[in-house]
Image (spheres, helix red, strand yellow):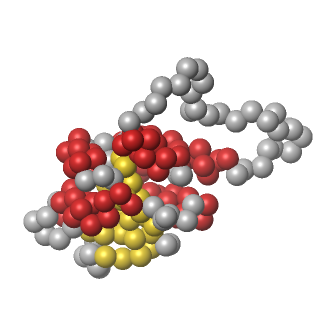
Amino acid sequence: MSMHIIIDGYNLIRQSHRLSALDRRALQMGREALLDTLAAYKKKASHTITVVFDGVGAPDFVHHRDKIQGINVTYSHQGESADAVIRQMVARKREKALVVSSDREVVQFASANGAATISSPEFEFRVTEALYDDMDPVEGQEETGWRPTTRKKGPSRRLSKKERRNRQKIRKL
């Protein structure tokens, strides 16, 4: 089953230290850096990725739907927010969607419709970790075999079915 990752574009950019610094210089630089990072990640993972931006700051020459470096890019229409577009997509995809946002309303709507959710900083961390995982060790250094992990050790406690499905989707990142 293929997972569809739906990203609240400006939310992710503004939650990231690296991307927000570029965004403050020029809005287009922040968008391009995000898309470059996601394109590199898409080469590793075969998930469908859609980034949704508010159409207010969109360049005039951009269509409302576009595909850049294998990433689906959607701009909201005039008078419509990116959150509304994300809600429509989640309503169609339901369990097949993973929503990346730190916006409480978007996260609550996605959870209520059966989609998995992950916060923007957590997603950025996992994507960065996945990209650096494949890097070869520096010449002269041997690999120690230890890799950082967020996996907990200790007594187990069974999570609810909804939480287990959510974690299963996030593990696929």
Q: Position of residue 124 (x, y in %)?
A: 47, 46
**Is 60 situated above or below 13?**
below
Q: Is residue 143 left or right of residue 92?
A: right
Can residue 87 be seen here? The reply is yes
Q: Residue at x 22, y 59 (%)?
A: 87
Viewer-proximal residue among 26 and 123: 123
Residue 64 placement: quadrant: bottom left
Q: Is residue 131 left or right of residue 84?
A: right
Q: Which percent across, then down, holds residue 170?
A: 47, 47
Residue 58 position in % (x across, y down): 26, 68
Q: What is the quadrant of residue 42 in the picture?
A: bottom right
Q: Nearer the viewer, residue 117 or 124?
A: 117
Q: Nearer the viewer, residue 74 or 99?
A: 99
Q: Is residue 118 visible?
A: no
Residue at the farthest top position: 155
Q: Is residue 157 above or below residue 7?
A: above
Q: Across the whole image, how many numbered discs are drawn on residues?
A: 0
- Residue positioned 13% across, 69% down in the render: 78
Could you tell me which residue is drawn at 35 percent across and 57 percent down?
95
Q: In the displayed image of the protein, which residue is found farthest to the left? A: 79
Residue at the image position 89 percent from the left and 40 percent from the top = 140
Q: Position of residue 54 (x, y in %)?
A: 23, 61
